[in-house]
Image (spheres, grey):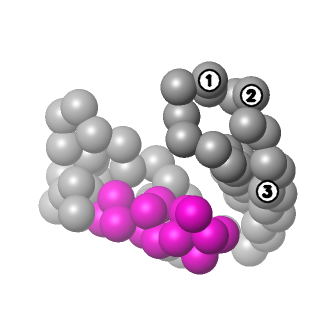
Amino acid sequence: MTLSEMVEMWYKEYKDFNYYENSCARGNICGHYTKMVWGKLNMLGCAIRRCDGAQPTWPKPVYLLVCQYEPQ
């Protein structure tokens, strides 16, 4: 999976986000999406690392993408 595909997965969380209630559909995750589109977000730093040992049952290669946002 490429970096672009990873970020696209986060963006696709919009499907589970309810703008009127400012909430995510029960049992789903929307936090990555809401951070991506947060109006006051002014700083973003991301790192990607290959980590095949992170989850032995996942198909290889395994890449982890982590981002820090400001303001949080």
Which amino acid type is marked by label 1?
Pro
Locate residue 14, reporting x and y percent: 30, 65
| Element assignment for label 3 | strand
> Which of the 4 image quadrants contains residue 52?
top right
> In this rendering, which labeled residue sits more in front, label 1 or label 3?
1
| Element assignment for label 2 | loop
| Residue drawn at x 35%, y 66% as measured from the top left | 12
Mark carried by residue 53? 2
Q: Is residue 15 left or right of residue 61?
A: left
Locate residue 23, reporting x and y percent: 27, 47
| Residue drawn at x 25%, y 57% as measured from the top left | 17
Which contiguous range is marked in magenta?
A: 1-14
Query: Label 3 vs label 2: CA separation?
Result: 15 Å
| Residue that badge 3 annotates | 48
| Residue drawn at x 82%, y 57% as measured from the top left | 47
Locate residue 50, reporting x and y percent: 79, 48
Query: Label 1 vs label 2: CA separation?
Result: 6 Å
| Residue that badge 1 annotates | 56
